[in-house]
Structure formats: structure tokens, C-alpha cells
């Protein structure tokens, strides 16, 4: 016997107090409905209705069991609704990771966008260095992440790429500050501030290769111990920094590099075969937030290469 179906029939007859009206509401034949109620009474071992020529009335046992049936049916409805939300990514816990330099505006757009797209979900979001994000994805301790490329990990799937051109941060009173778009080769002989190599080894090495390919041989590549030291080196004029566009610290200016030879490539990533609905919702929301609020560009963007400042400097 399909107990849930029989309970729904029982509830309909109890509410209508008439087999004919209940059958019409349920869109089944009245004899079939009467037979199903008899089956339920036989299964439960109690009489649910007093039957009369003008309709039916619940017996005392039927009144007690109707309340229990209502709870079962409501609980079943909640269970099915929760299962539907899980299937569509609108419920459950999603473990996600982002690198530390997305900028507060883009990150806020990601958080609010995902909350709106998946209101029943709990987003367990962690901020991790680029290299650690990749390791956690490979270990499947996070379900989805925003990653920088190159991303040297097997077994991952990726969302579409976005590009973030890098420029140079200079002391405002320095000799290069009046150049609108300095060439990368013009930084030869200067000390360059980059992010610590340990945080993103593949990206760090790729950037050094690009410097060499474009004729830039720095005096030294500096790995400051913290953001304040990095900014101080630029402010004193003893070094310049390569960074995406943002709001420059007081006393500094940011300039795009001629030809945009350096860019950070960013996308979402998740373990192969584990791109369920919640992962897809996060990936779509992250892509939109980074493009609209983080100043990142699609590879084929036909718009100015350097939009309005939208990110913060990573130091």
C-alpha cells in the first residue's frame, strides 16, 4: 500500500466530509476512493469515518489520526522541498576558497550574489594563498575556488578566464611618474616588488619569464615581509611594484604598461566530476562579480583595457 497517497486521500475526505466531492478534488473515481479508504482502515485496524447518506464524519479515532496524518504529509513536503533545493544547489553547505587580493568590492558582490542565488545554502568561504587554494582543490577539501593561472594541478575543471592587466606603482615624485604608459623594458635596473613566491610559485615564475622576454632585467626582485614594507619601498623611490590597477597609496601613482605585457589570468575551478548545481552557481556568481566589480576583463572584451579602479593593491 502507498501509505502517503492513502493519507492524502484520507485528508481530502476529512476536509470535504463527502466522498463525491473529495473524489472530484482528487480527480479519481468515487468507488476507487472509497476502496482506498477501506484499505487504509484495514491497514490501521480502525474505522476512520462514520458514513451516512449525506456525507461522512470523522470518528474519534479518525480525528486523532488526522492530526498525525497531517504532520506526516507536512514533513514529507518539507523533505521533498529540501531535496529539490539540494538538487538545484539552493541548499546545503558549499566549501569555497578565494585568493587574498580580489578586493573587498568584488568579494562583497560575490557574497551577496551567491546568497541571492542560493538563499538556503551555507557558504563556508576561506581566504587562502594562491598555492594553498590549488592544494586544497586537489585534496577536495574545498568544493570550488577562485584560482590564478598557471594552475599546476591535475583533475580540475575550470570556468571561463578573466584577465587583469598589471601596471607599475611608482613614487609620485619619481622620474617615471610623468610617463603615461611606460614600457616594461624601462624598468630595467630598478628593484621590483612582487608578491612572495611561496604564495604562487607558478605565477611568480611566469612573471619573471615575461619580464625577460620583454627586455626587462631588474636589479633585484624583492619579497617584502608585509604590505607596509612593500608600500614604503615604493614611497621612498627605492623600488617600483607590479600590481593590478587599484587606488594607489598616498604619495604613489599607478601607470599601465605599454602593450599590457603582464596580466593575471583568473577563473573558478573545481575537482573534475564534482561540478554540481551549487558549484555552478558559485562559479557563475564569482565570474560576474569579478567582471563587474573587480575590474577583470574577458579575453575578447571590446572595451577600454583599463576600466575604472575597482580593486585594492595586494600590499
Image: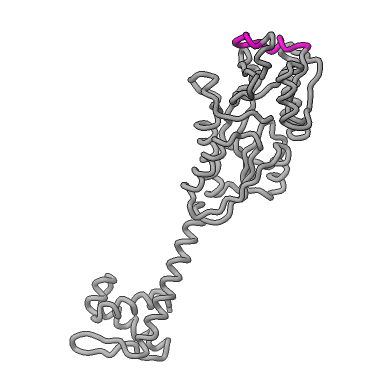
Relative to 152, residue 5 above or below:
below
Image quarter hosting the N terminus? bottom left
Relative to 8, residue 102 above or below:
above
Find out whether residue 191 is within the magenta segment: no
Horizontal arrangement in the rendering, residue 224 relative to residue 306 (left or right):
right
Q: Which residues are magenta?
A: 177-189
> Residue 183: image x %, image y %?
66, 10
How many marks the image carries: the answer is: 0
Horizontal arrangement in the rendering, residue 211 relative to residue 274 (left or right):
right
Query: Can you see residue 87?
Result: no
> Residue 62: image x %, image y %?
35, 86
- Classified by dominant secondary structure, the portion drawn in magenta counts as loop
Q: Say which residue appears at 41% left-offset and 73% top-offset.
A: 73
Q: Quadrant of residue 101?
A: top right
> Residue 16: image x %, image y %?
25, 77
Relative to 78, residue 51 above or below:
below
Relative to 30, residue 155 above or below:
above
Image quarter hosting the C terminus? top right
Query: Can you see residue 226?
Result: yes
Coloring basis for residues: one colour
Q: Say which residue appears at 79% left-offset and 21% top-offset.
A: 221
Nearest the camera: 179 or 2?
179
Q: In the orientation shown, which residue stands out farthest toward the right?
A: 220
Q: Say which residue appears at 62% left-offset and 18% top-offset.
A: 254
Nearest the camera: 263 or 128?
128
> Residue 22: image x %, image y %?
26, 76
Amino acid at each position: 500500500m502507498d501509505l502517503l497517497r492513502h493519507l492524502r486521500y484520507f485528508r481530502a475526505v476529512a476536509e470535504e466530509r463527502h466522498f463525491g466531492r473529495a473524489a472530484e478534488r482528487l480527480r479519481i473515481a468515487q468507488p476507487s476512493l472509497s476502496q482506498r479508504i477501506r484499505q487504509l482502515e484495514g491497514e490501521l485496524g480502525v474505522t476512520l469515518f462514520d458514513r451516512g447518506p449525506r456525507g461522512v464524519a470523522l470518528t474519534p479515532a479518525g480525528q486523532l489520526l488526522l492530526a498525525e496524518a497531517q504532520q506526516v504529509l507536512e514533513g514529507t513536503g518539507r523533505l521533498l522541498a529540501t531535496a529539490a533545493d539540494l538538487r538545484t544547489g539552493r541548499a546545503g553547505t558549499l566549501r569555497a576558497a578565494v585568493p587574498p587580493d580580489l578586493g573587498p568590492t568584488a568579494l562583497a558582490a560575490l557574497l551577496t550574489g551567491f546568497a541571492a542565488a542560493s538563499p538556503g545554502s551555507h557558504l563556508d568561504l576561506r581566504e587562502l594563498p594562491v598555492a594553498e587554494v590549488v592544494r586544497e582543490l586537489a585534496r577536495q577539501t574545498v568544493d570550488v575556488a577562485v584560482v590564478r593561472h598557471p594552475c599546476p594541478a591535475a583533475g580540475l575543471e575550470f570556468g571561463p578566464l578573466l584577465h587583469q592587466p598589471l601596471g607599475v606603482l611608482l613614487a609620485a615624485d619619481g622620474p617615471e611618474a610623468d610617463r603615461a604608459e611606460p614600457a616594461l623594458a624601462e624598468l630595467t635596473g630598478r628593484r621590483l616588488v612582487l608578491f612572495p613566491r611561496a604564495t604562487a610559485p607558478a605565477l611568480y615564475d611566469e612573471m619573471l619569464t615575461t619580464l625577460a622576454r620583454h627586455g626587462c632585467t631588474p636589479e633585484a626582485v624583492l619579497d617584502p615581509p608585509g604590505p607596509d614594507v612593500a608600500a614604503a619601498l615604493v614611497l621612498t623611490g627605492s623600488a617600483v611594484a607590479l600590481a593590478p590597477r587599484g587606488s594607489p597609496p598616498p604619495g604613489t601613482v599607478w601607470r599601465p604598461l605599454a602593450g599590457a605585457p603582464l596580466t593575471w589570468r583568473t577563473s573558478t575551478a573545481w575537482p573534475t566530476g564534482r561540478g554540481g548545481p551549487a558549484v555552478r552557481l558559485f562559479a557563475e556568481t564569482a565570474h560576474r562579480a569579478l567582471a563587474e566589480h573587480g575590474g577583470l576583463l574577458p579575453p575578447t572584451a571590446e572595451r577600454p583595457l583599463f576600466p575604472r579602479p575597482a580593486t585594492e593593491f595586494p600590499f
